[in-house]
Amino acid sequence: MILAFSSAIVNSQNIIGAWEMSTTSKQGVLIKNVVIFTEGYQVISRYESETGNFIGCNGGTWKLNDDIMTEKVEFDTQTPERIGNEVRFEIAITDTTLNIVGANKRIFKRIDKGTPGKLQGAWLMSGKMRDGRVQSRDINRPRKTMKILSGSRFQWIAYNTETKQFMGTGGGTYNTYNGKYTENIEFFSRDNSKVGDSLEFNFTMNHGKWHHQGFSSKGNAIHEIWTIRP
């Protein structure tokens, strides 16, 4: 029992971070598959490597017992009927690879281990600053905007677990330096023309909350407040 428990802890720690796998479509288009694992939450996305054209994503909660991964689906752009269901599969992890056992050629290579970016984790938008006042948002409601970050990858997802509606997503690489948080967009489901753009924001931590201030991809001034997801 002690050995099995220790193995589960080690594997859980090893899986944290970002992983990548390249595949080719029937049309010969190179597809990038990126999965981000934080403590308890994950997302996997597929998009065309060259154009950034978004194909799909799914994610939710996860737990690992020895080599069996159990995921509870919170959003799924291609098969929304899976939302609310649990899926289980066997994985094999090394320091550099994540293998979905039994799935043909589904081997992901590690991108990072949750560093060097300072914002690793799953965050929920919990409010906005308007006219100097905080407008709070209930993070327990079905309608969620989640931002999930490894040490170098980010992705935001807007969805509703009750209606199974998916509102949008975008992601790519990020870095944090000297109070600045910079996103480099690799895919954006709502507007493919934003692929390749970089957005710089000021970020501060205030009583455990992430204050995110700057201009959106549309050029609108924003001051968002994010709370780490429990």
Image (tube, rainbow, N blue to C red):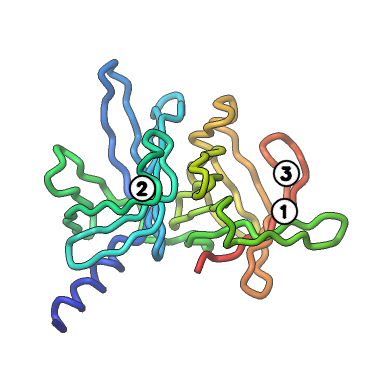
* Residue topped by disc 3: 215
In percent of the image, x 36 and y 47: which residue is there? 35
Specify whether residue 119 is in view: yes
* Residue type indicated by callout 2: Val
Residue highlighted by disc 2: 35
C-alpha gap between disc 1 and disc 2: 26 Å
**Cβ–Cβ under 8 Å for marks 3 and 2:** no
Q: Residue at coordinates 73% horizontally, 44% vertically from top-left?
A: 215
Q: Of the two numbered discs 1 and 2 on the same chain, state the one appearing first in sequence.
A: 2
- Observer-nearest residue: 136 or 19? 136
Q: Position of residue 191 (x, y in %)?
A: 58, 28
Indicate the secondary structure of the residue bearing disc 3.
strand
**SS assignment at label 1:** strand
Name of the residue lying farthest toward the top: 27
The amino acid at mark 1 is Gln
**Residue type, label 3:** Phe
Q: Is residue 157 left or right of residue 10?
A: right
Mark 1 surroundings within 10 Å by alpha-carbon count, few (fewer than 14), some (14 through 19), many (20 or more): many
Residue beneath disc 1 = 213
Whole-number angstrom distance, CA of label 3 to CA of label 2:
27 Å
The front one of 145 and 176 is 145
Within-10-Å neighbours for mark 3: few <14, some 14–19, many 20+: some
Give the residue furthest to the right: 131
Residue 203, compared with residue 49, is above or below; it is below
In what element is the residue under mark 2?
strand
Q: Is residue 103 above or below residue 63?
A: above
Task: Please indicate, yes or no, whether residue 156 appears anywhere in the rendered image.
Answer: no
